[in-house]
Amino acid sequence: MVAPVPSDSLVARALASDSAAMARLMTRAEAGSPECRPALAQIYAKAGRAHVIGITGVPGSGKSTLVSTLTVKLRRSGKRVGIIAVDPSSPYSGGSIMGDRIRMSELVGDEGIFIRSMATHGAHGGMARASLEAVDVLDAAGFDYVIIETVGVGQAEVEIARAAHTVVVVSAPGLGDDIQAIKAGILEIADIHAVSKCDRSDANRTVSDLKTMLAMGMSLASGGAWQSPVVPTSSAKGEGFEQLIECLDRHGQLMRHSDAGRERVRRIAEFRMLKTAEDLLHQRFLEARQGTLVAVSAQLSDRRISPYQAAERLLNGINLQGSP
Amino acid sequence: MVAPVPSDSLVARALASDSAAMARLMTRAEAGSPECRPALAQIYAKAGRAHVIGITGVPGSGKSTLVSTLTVKLRRSGKRVGIIAVDPSSPYSGGSIMGDRIRMSELVGDEGIFIRSMATHGAHGGMARASLEAVDVLDAAGFDYVIIETVGVGQAEVEIARAAHTVVVVSAPGLGDDIQAIKAGILEIADIHAVSKCDRSDANRTVSDLKTMLAMGMSLASGGAWQSPVVPTSSAKGEGFEQLIECLDRHGQLMRHSDAGRERVRRIAEFRMLKTAEDLLHQRFLEARQGTLVAVSAQLSDRRISPYQAAERLLNGINLQGSP
């Protein structure tokens, strides 16, 4: 199904962990142009060994600091760590917010670490598809852990974190009511709860609240064989990370060697199929906009047809075009 | 294209502003079952008169309080106001977070107001499609203003707010750094900037920062004929809402009677076509999962085909099935 990889190609260099080649493939994945699909298919075929970890939390939860500290700790055991940060985008700045990454200065120059911020330029960026293709690049290049970090607010953003073998939800003490309300919506996707800022006196309350919630039966993310642990951490003091890594590895092993894990891998594959199909749909929608679809969109705009009728024509019209 | 509406039907009762009928249609839109499509098509054909206002802001921006106060003020001029609140969902509570709505108790029992919270049960809820169908119901029932309120974090959530004639972005003084960073990403979609909590002494700074930003040329949402105004408001003191309503009406007039407005209506129609097509794609993906797609998803899961190849098969397979 997949063509062999020429030894001097971009793909071959990315597979050999050439940073520039990996970065270029990720840029092409973000652009989403059809020409990069054969390369990404070659990468996909080589991936599948890394432990992919989704780390999410509401704004202010300290998740970026936790990711930075976790990465430093994982590096000390010789493991290679890739980070894909899915940040809020800003069309006018044209880039992602990198403030948190500055704290990682001690990691700069370490070839066992690769960090990439994914921006979502405009409304339809194929954010999920591109982010998971970037994960593939790191996975295929032999990184042991690939962390997908997303803000834990927003349907699309939470979905991406869930497309991982292990999901860590970061909670912090002392957040405002509006943030707490949003937090409630993501707790149930956690395989592991990490509580950040546990050097603060009010962190005990956050830990005990989570434990109470779990005791009431709200931990279902990994199926019956797994009880989601609550891990108190302090990035300031460097505490709790041994336990966090132990939990990550234990959950990673479970996912690798259980039916629940195989089912999860299958679900992730289905998610990618659907997100890629949505992206193709959108690309062809944009292509068709200048042609046959102008009449359909005008009829819809004038309310002579319904959104469902227009959508059927879009789906059917796209198919009649054939595909490369 | 659209069948006539029998006088005793659910649609006829919704068009006559029967609250129970409107609520039932919205519930059916949320469920997304094919049986409700003829009714929603009839509703869509009758809609198109309301001024649809998207109101968004980061958590803690005070947007729900602003929406409540604005609604009270609009009611005093005799206008009917519908609110579609797109809230973070929680699969385990099965409902939306209604806390903010409690503040609207003075509005309860007023038939000129209809409030609906849209929940997104699970990852693929067709949130945009269903929310905009709920807007149609209120629009077709003759509500003068329909407000779509969404949290201003998350690609999907921001997209929904943008599918309005006029977008209001709510900013507040005194938010944390993480929130400020996210806020930056939504400012450029504003037709109108509302600053909340202007009874606070630090609100002047928020107002002047926004004005500086706009002076630097960052107001492009409505095209050249419109300068996005910055409106200071205080829900606590009830101040600033006359100016906000004046700006809303002025922008609504511009959208109704300009090429930029007609272009915007066309873009909203295209967005709906695409979101509805995505939703149909997902529904048929779920239907096909038990049949022909099992083999495709297994091949993808085993990395024998790429996500693009799987996506092509999904798009093509769907078409071969035909559609109801």
Image (cartoon, coloured by chain):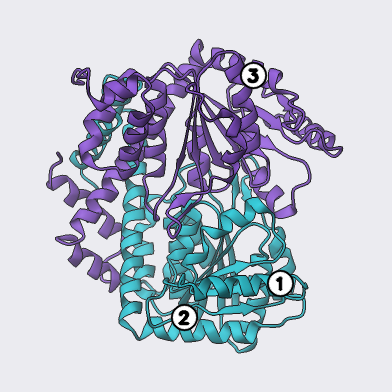
Chain colours: A cyan, B purple
Q: Are marks 1 and 2 on the same chain?
A: yes
The residue carrying mark 1 is A203
Q: Is residue B90 visible?
A: yes
Residue A229 coordinates in the image, percent (x, y): 54, 80
Q: Secondary structure at mark 1?
A: helix
The three-letter amino acid code for the residue at tag 2 is Gln
Q: Return the disc, 1 or 2, that comes first in the chain's sequence.
A: 1
Q: CA distance from mark 2 to mark 3?
A: 52 Å
Where residue B187 appears, x then y in whole percent?
65, 37
The image position of residue A178, as x and y in percent, is: 64, 50
Asked if the residue under mark 3 is in contact with the one under mark 2, i.e. CB atoms within 8 Å, the reply is no
Name the residue at 60% across, 86% down: A243
* Residue bearing the label numbered 2: A227
Q: Tell me the crowding category of disc 2: few under 14, some 14 to 19, or many 20 or more residues within 10 angstroms, Cα based.
A: some
Q: Mark 3 = which residue?
A: B245
Q: How many marks?
A: 3
Q: Amino acid at mark 3?
A: Ile
Answer whether residue A122 is visible to the viewer in this image. no
